[in-house]
Amino acid sequence: MNIGEIASRAGVSRSTVSYALSGKRSVSAATRKRIQDVIDELGYRPNAAARALKEGRTRTIGLVIPPASTRLTHMQLGFVASVVEAAGHADLDVLLSPSGGDHDRSFERLLSGGRVDGVILMEIRLEDSRVRRLQDTGIPFVGIGHTARALEMRWIDVDYATLINQCVHHLADLGHTRIALINRSAALVAAGYGPGHRAREGFTAALAQRGIQGIDVECGDDVLAGRDCIAQLLRDHPGTTAAATINEAALPGIQRGLEEAGLAVPKDFSLTGVVGRTWAEEFRPPLTAADVPAQDMGAQAMDLLLECIADPTAPFRNILLAPPVSLRSSTAPAPSRPHRG
Amino acid sequence: MNIGEIASRAGVSRSTVSYALSGKRSVSAATRKRIQDVIDELGYRPNAAARALKEGRTRTIGLVIPPASTRLTHMQLGFVASVVEAAGHADLDVLLSPSGGDHDRSFERLLSGGRVDGVILMEIRLEDSRVRRLQDTGIPFVGIGHTARALEMRWIDVDYATLINQCVHHLADLGHTRIALINRSAALVAAGYGPGHRAREGFTAALAQRGIQGIDVECGDDVLAGRDCIAQLLRDHPGTTAAATINEAALPGIQRGLEEAGLAVPKDFSLTGVVGRTWAEEFRPPLTAADVPAQDMGAQAMDLLLECIADPTAPFRNILLAPPVSLRSSTAPAPSRPHRG
DNA sequence: TTGTATGCGTTATCAA
DNA sequence: TTGATAACGCATACAA
């Protein structure tokens, strides 16, 4: 079933069918109806490949997510969901590529052969070969996250440095003097994962500004790692009374670890950080945290991408979000008699 | 950059380049090398749209996931990850379509216009309009889950009826006489979600076989719902000493609810069910459960689909998995003096 | 208002 | 062993 079939059944030429569908040329009401009837009857839809070949665009974007081996966090899932939703809204399809490393086949398939009109890249590192690869190909792309050379690409990101800084100031205001930063996994940070490094910057800066001590620990993205991380933290640094985290996947483990140590939140231990809203609200007690608006971010990334596809020469535009720290119930004044781990 | 460019630079015809790439015609070693050198230098890859148009297949499959509004469970995420990985292994791309309802645009885009060579469908209901739609189009498809008319499609599924039945028998063997089934959300079950109904069947059958009482409750797919569900269960049915569940997303909430009620697992309350392995192992204490092998299932679904794409006339093949119930630490003999909720 | 003809980049058939 | 060419289905410039 193709446009020729529709044309002959409707007794018109193929171009008339094409124009009736696109509306780029006026078609008499009578013929338009005749064509539409045939189309409805046969359920015709233009072939995507032929259209892509002719138009030079595929109406498809690529979404590069972390590799399948790593479990996606809820925040990342929020990005995926909102990107896909925004794409659907713009009548675009989404091709999924789980790839992190350098010469990923799925990533190369995505870029080569003109499969996509644009790409949205997740979990970007400070130095990211995929970004360079995309820049080489000239395919429009937008990062959820950005590299060290922030001005050389389009992106939307969360201002982890500022937000963690604010969290530490909040804790310091409450009298805490020994504060931990619970970062993402050591592997990720070592690989140059931006938020991990920027969170650390903000942390260190705030510590200096307030003249207090801090310990910076890395933690795997899962429940067990979170529990072990807290256990080790309390063992190695028994005076610690508060922590800020950007590791939402570790939160349930952190909670369990604190419980097992007999520490109540926030009476004995204050916890805050930068996490997705759902996590903050599901924590017991609800977490004082800067809520990452994952839903909005996917849609805004899509906006940036559409802008860039429409006009590839448009200047780079970046969006740096610093959502306010929502005061909930997980932070309190430092205990007067700090516990002994 | 296209095949003609490569051809002229290598001093051969376009067809020779094509054959050098596909290997469907012998090409002299010398010309093959000359062509390959040019290709490597320019980084040429065949245009996907042109190839799809000519070959009549897109080397792309569609993956239909639950709508963006609902948060994916880890199990569903496991399906997605393993399907995408298996697809990459077969050099196939994956087009994502989050759609549940009847006339979903994204779903229609997927089916029409020959965008995909096949479809994998998740979260199937007993009566599912998407299945009928796919059957009408004739596009090869495979379900992760199946409809009421199981023999009319290809699928892979977990035998929830049998597994929940085994769980209940296990609990009954331990002396429990008041057992709850914690199902998926009321909305999902009402919509005819298969696993919800089959779990209920297995539950009811086991109760009858053992002559014990049971209560069947539905529970939303999140932490808060799990907590409320347990609270209400203990209030309305205070004699309940054990539960089996297929709702992994509610597990953390169930745990919290039990803790808040002052019930220790497994001393005061036994818990078991059918969940992804990670959930079972992350539960405290580790959950006695039938572990859904989400990773394998995506790969096997892919196998079924490839089989079906290769030969659409092949008879329907189905895979019903009943993984063994792994004994861990969340079930114990019923308490001699049952608690009073 | 409508029809004819061309080309998008491939693969594959036919011819050499 | 290789080259010329048709066809996949569509959108559009050009012609009427």
Image (cartoon, coloured by chain):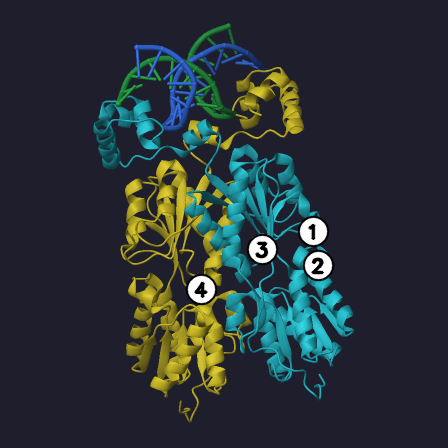
Chain colours: A cyan, B yellow, C green, D blue
Tell me which amino acid carries mark 4.
Pro
In this rendering, the label closer to the viewer, 4 or 1: 1
Q: Quadrant of residue A181?
A: bottom right
Mark 2 → mark 3, Cα distance in angstroms: 23 Å
Q: Secondary structure at mark 4?
A: loop
Q: Which residue is mark 2?
A: A197
Crowding near the residue tagged with mark 3, few <14, some 14–19, many ≥20 C-alpha atoms within 10 Å: few
**Callout 2 amino acid:** His
Q: Amino acid at mark 1?
A: Leu
Q: Position of residue A274 (x, y in %)?
A: 60, 66
- Amino acid carrying mark 3 in the image: Ser
Q: Are marks 2 and 3 on the same chain?
A: yes
Q: Chain of mark 2?
A: A
| Left or right side of B144 for B265 | right
Q: Is residue A336 left or right of residue A250?
A: right
Residue at 75% x, 77% y: name it. A236
**Residue at the disc numbered 4:** B323
Residue under numbered circle 1: A126
Q: Is disc 1 placed on a helix, strand or loop?
A: loop
Judging by the rendered image, the residue that carries numbered circle 3 is A69
Whether residues under marks 1 and 2 lie with C-beta atoms below 8 angstroms apart, the answer is yes
Residue B172, position as x, y percentages in the image: 38, 81
Q: Secondary structure at mark 2?
A: helix
Image point 27% across, 28% down: which residue?
A6
Q: Are marks 4 and 1 in contact (CB under 8 Å)?
A: no
